[in-house]
Amino acid sequence: MNLKEQGRLLRQDNFTVWTGKKKHQRRVFLQDDLVIFSKVRKQPGGVDLYYYKNSLKVPAASHNKSAR
């Protein structure tokens, strides 16, 4: 997936996913045309790696102005 083709990055934040009694942290990126869910892995030296988990296409017209 080419992220440059998905539009501008509008917001990003952490998101908690519950599966039964387990909780998982995800990083969510809101772009002009897509919402991307990724898994964060902390690496030595303070580097975070993001692993793609899922994405949802969203029409640009559906964003409200408070998200920008």
Image: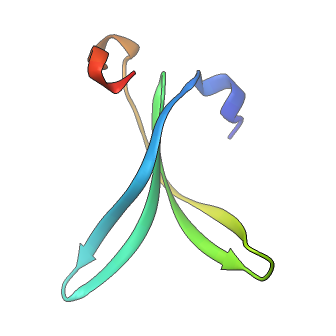
Q: In this view, does 28 lie above or below 61?
A: below
**For the image shown, how many numbered marks are present on the structure?**
0
Find residue 15 and report its horizontal and vertical position in percent: 35, 60
Q: Position of residue 67 (x, y in %)?
A: 33, 26
Tell me which residue sits at (67%, 24%) in the image: 5
State left or right for residue 49 relative to residue 65.
right
Question: Which residue corresponds to the image point at 48% horizontal and 22% vertical from the top-left?
Answer: 32
Q: Is residue 49 above or below residue 7?
A: below
| Residue 42 seen in render | yes
Name, please, the residue furthest toward the top.
61
In the orientation shown, which residue stands out farthest toward the right?
45
Q: Where is residue 6 in the image (x, y as percent from the top left)?
A: 59, 26
Residue at x 68% of width, y 67% of height: 48
Identify the residue at the far front of this view. Answer: 46
Q: Nearer the viewer, residue 15 or 62?
A: 15
Q: Is residue 43 left or right of residue 58?
A: right
How is the model colour-coded?
A: rainbow
Q: Quadrant of the C terminus?
A: top left
* Residue 55 drawn above or below residue 33: below
Residue 35 relative to residue 42: left or right: left
Residue 37 locus on image (x, y percent): 46, 53
Residue located farthest toward the left when viewing the structure as drawn: 20
Q: What residue is at 26 percent from the left and 17 percent from the top?
A: 64
Q: Would residue 62 be seen by someone viewing this image from the given angle?
A: no
> Within the image, what quadrant is residue 20 found in?
bottom left
**Nearest the eye: 44 or 36:** 44
Quarter of the image where the N terminus is located:
top right
